[in-house]
Amino acid sequence: MENEYIHETYHDNGNLKTITYYSNGLVHNTDDSPAHLIFFESGDIHYEAYYKNGFLHREDGEPSNYYYDQYGEVLRQSFYFNGEKYREDIINFSITDY
């Protein structure tokens, strides 16, 4: 039987800060759903990542992780298969984003 659990952290204002899904002690989620998410203090998503058995992983050529700006625009996305990066796209970048 799998040992599955979810770990959450919160910003001081009570909004969700991170959520991570685990299976058998490894970061993992099923059904092609993100396993690790980070949120801005506003509650908007900042980062999402797809893991399989502890490794960044996504099949069918989809990005394994995304970084978003505070307006919800994708800044960068990376592609991994079994933990090996094979591509990264910088989509929107401005020095004011950081």
Image (cartoon, helix red, strand yellow):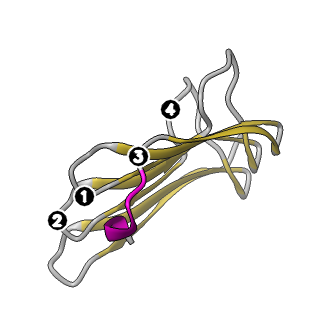
Q: Is residue 44 left or right of residue 55?
A: left
Tell me, yes or no, whether the two marked residues, 4 and 2, touch with CB atoms within 8 Å: no
Tell me, yes or no, whether the two marked residues, 4 and 1, touch with CB atoms within 8 Å: no
Element class at badge 1? loop
Mark pair 4, 3: CA separation: 24 Å
Q: Nearer the viewer, residue 56 or 93?
A: 93
Element class at badge 3? loop
The kind of residue tagged 1 is Gln
Horizontal and vertical percent position of residue 41 = 22, 71
Locate the C terminus and report the quarter of the image it occupies: bottom left
Q: Which numbered disc flags the more N-terminal residue, 3 or 2?
A: 2
> Mark 1, residues whose alpha carbon is within 10 Å: few (<14), some, or many (≥20)?
some
Mark pair 3, 2: CA separation: 21 Å
Q: Which numbered disc flags the more N-terminal residue, 4 or 1?
A: 4
- Residue marked by disc 1: 70
Tell me, yes or no, whether the two marked residues, 4 and 3, touch with CB atoms within 8 Å: no
Instruction: Considering the whole magenta stretch, tell me its main secondary structure.
Output: helix
- Residue marked by disc 2: 42
The kind of residue tagged 3 is Asn
- Residue marked by disc 4: 33
Locate the N terminus and report the quarter of the image it occupies: top right
